[in-house]
Amino acid sequence: MSEPFTVAIDGPAASGKGTISRAVAERFGFAHLDTGLLYRAVGVKMLEGVDPVAAARALTRADLEDGDWLRGAEAAQAASKVAVLPAVRAALVDFQRAFARRAGGAVLDGRDIGTVICPQAEVKLFVTASAEVRAHRRYLELRAKGSDATEKEVLADVIARDERDSERATAPLRAAGDAQRLDTSHLSIGEAVSEAVRAVEERYKAI
Ligand code: C5P
């Protein structure tokens, strides 16, 4: 397919949206952008003493490549702090919109893709799970990487980030009115991916 086709996948931390997004992109041959990485990269620059707005304006692909550091808990908290700044969000809009409308289809996952970045997306999913289930998943992931954080600490982190993301004035975490909700609390990864693939397929076939 050479036309643009955007799949917007939003949801809170550790809801499963990243795994689902990668699987959908692979299944349909679409490009994938984890927009959380943009905010994490800006957050890390802030921790290094750079002004976050200047960092967002100057962000390059190379800044997105330090995977382990960017995916850690410290980068996540820093990301959700810079993500409340309207000027940081504004600096990242054009890149995300251009990515979304590239030829051949794109999946973007984040918090505001269906509401702000791509309100016209062909498919919108809002992926959720209870805070306890999400914290448990994140805890297992962190433990596998050798972290000694307790499940209680991880739950507190998840709740703090949910609050900051949902309560900010600009582009808060919220399902678009026309998004399909996918609660993964009681689904395996395979089941969650199948549901998402089905939702994309329905719309993809209709075009
Ligand atoms: O998705 P991830 O957990 O990597 O995102 C890190 C943080 O970046 C989120 O907690 C949120 O504050 C911010 N973010 C955002 N908008 C997006 C993606 C991420 O505000 N589209």
Image (cartoon, rainbow, N blue to C red):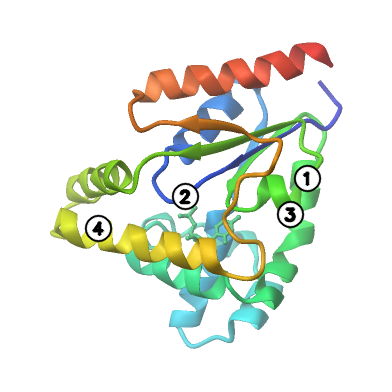
Check disc 1: other Cα within 10 Å, few if <14, some if 14-19, many if 20+. some
The mark that comes first in sequence, 4 or 3, is 3
Residue under the point 50% across and 57% down: 65
Give percent across and percent down for residue 196. Answer: 55, 23
Check disc 4: other Cα within 10 Å, few if <14, some if 14-19, many if 20+. many
Check disc 2: other Cα within 10 Å, few if <14, some if 14-19, many if 20+. many
Residue under label 4: 154
If the image is split into quadrants, where does the N terminus sit? Answer: top right
The mark that comes first in sequence, 2 or 3, is 2
How far apart in space, not on screen, are marks 2 and 3 (Cα)?
16 Å
Q: What residue type is disc 2 on?
A: Pro
Residue 134 appears in the picture as rendered:
yes
Residue under label 3: 116
Q: What residue type is disc 4 on?
A: Val
How far apart in space, not on screen, are marks 4 and 1 (Cα)?
32 Å
How far apart in space, not on screen, are marks 4 and 3 (Cα)?
29 Å
Q: Quadrant of residue 144?
A: top left
Q: Quadrant of residue 150?
A: bottom left
